[in-house]
Every structure is written in C-alpha cells, then in structure tokens.
Image (tube, helix red, strand yellow):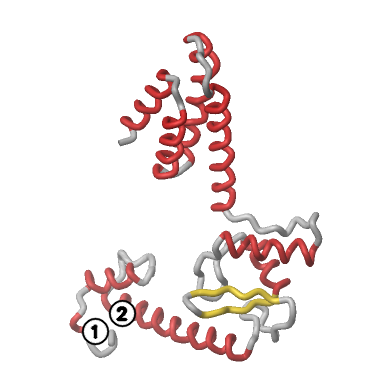
Amino acid sequence: MLISYSNNFNVKALKRLCKIKGIKFINERKKDELLNLLKKFNAAKIIQKKLRQKTIIDFICPVCHEPLKYPFVSIKVRQKFFYYDFYTLIEYLNKTQDFRDPCTRYIISDTKLIQINKMIRYYYGKTTNKILISKSMIKNTDLHIITYCLHDIVKEIENRELSIEETYNNILPRFIYYTNYLIKNHSEEDSNIILKACKESLTNHIIIDYINLIEMMNS
C-alpha cells in the first residue's frame, strides 16, 4: 500500500508511521528514505512471519535451528505456541539476560519463568546457577520484603500504648525509612495500597498523621 500510494503521504505522516512501527533514527530522514525504511520493515515482518510459521510446522527450534527433541520448552503468544530446545533456550536467556520470547519479542511472564526454573532445577540440579531471575521478579521480591518490614512494625505496636518518646525515638524513624524506600522504589499504586492497609491497622495517631501527610503530598 505504501508503494502504490506513496505520494499521498507527507514526511510528517511517514515519520508518524515509523514511530508507530518502532523505527528509530528518523528525524533527519527525507521522504524517499522514510519510504524505503518502511518498505524494508514491512518486508522483514513478512519474512519473520513465514519463518515463524515454518518453525512451528517443521517443529524446529528457531534458536539453534535443530529438530526439537525432549526436553523442550513451549511458550504461548497470542494463541500460538513457539517451541524451543530446552538447553539452547536456557543458555540463550542466561547469556543475553533478555527475558523475551526469541521469536515474537514478547516478554516472557514471571509465571512462565518460574515453570522453566522448575525444569532447570530438575535437569541441572538444585545447586545450579542457571536459574532465571527477571527484573520484575526481583522487584516483586523487594516489594514483599518491604511489606513484611512495615507489617512487623504494625504488629509490634498493635494494642500497645506507646509513649511519645518511644514513638519518636524507635517506631516512627523505622516507619519513615521503610515508607520512603517503598515510595522511591515502587509504583504509586502499590505504595498507596500498602500504606492504606497500614493506616487501617494502626491506632497510633502520630504514625497515622504521618501516613496522612505522605498521602497528601503524593496526591
């Protein structure tokens, strides 16, 4: 379509199309260059699609290009399954640390990585260093740890009458530290949910007032 109706597209429209398709370094490009980039991009997409279909039909690993044999890993993307040689995929993911499906470039979910890690422990042993850990898995673990830290403070002062000195010298500084860490390193949505849960479980007005202040500042 771009070839037949290229005269209908101005440079601004072509640059917009390039951005939609994720084509970079286009600011200084002329109209002919932009058209050429789009044609090459579309041609590459068609070739990639055909190759992916071929790997599915022929049951060939698209990474090592060898016939699949047990064990292998299947990754489902948009109702289609892509199959990879287990050992090849593990080496690829460990080397690149790029936890996206090699064919489609869609992010492999943490749930799928956990499933693959079970296979890794089975075939490589429980002490292996090949376990796959994504950034989101690290972030979720960190969120769980900081949540437990705040929970421990809430449980520590639950149903207790604290003096002002103990609140300001012991409880509040720890609560402020964990809260600041939470807000700095995690999403606003997660932070709000956790702080709201803390506030609903607390009776200490000094800490409740601090949470109210944080919520007001971040609103």
Give the secondary structure at mark 1: helix
**Residue 126 marker:** none
Would you identify the image quadrant in which residue 83 lies? bottom right
Cβ atoms under marks 1 and 2 closer than 8 Å: yes
Residue 86 is drawn in which quadrant? bottom right
On screen, 174 above or below 142?
Answer: above
Q: Which mark is residue 35?
A: 2
Instruction: Give the residue type that dot 2 points to.
Output: Leu
Could you tell me residue 162's position as x and y percent?
51, 13
Q: Height in image: 193 above or below 34?
A: above
Say whether residue 60 is left or right of residue 79.
Answer: right
Identity of the residue drawn at 42% across and 30% down:
199
* Disc on res. 6: 1
Q: Secondary structure at mark 2?
A: helix
Q: How many numbered discs sit on the rendered protein? A: 2
Picture coordinates of residue 207 (x, y %)? 43, 22
**How packed is label 1: few (under 14 Cα within 10 Å), some, or many (20 or more)?**
few
Q: Earlier in the sequence, mark 1 or mark 2?
A: 1
Q: Residues within 10 Å of mark 2 (few under 14, many from 20)?
A: many
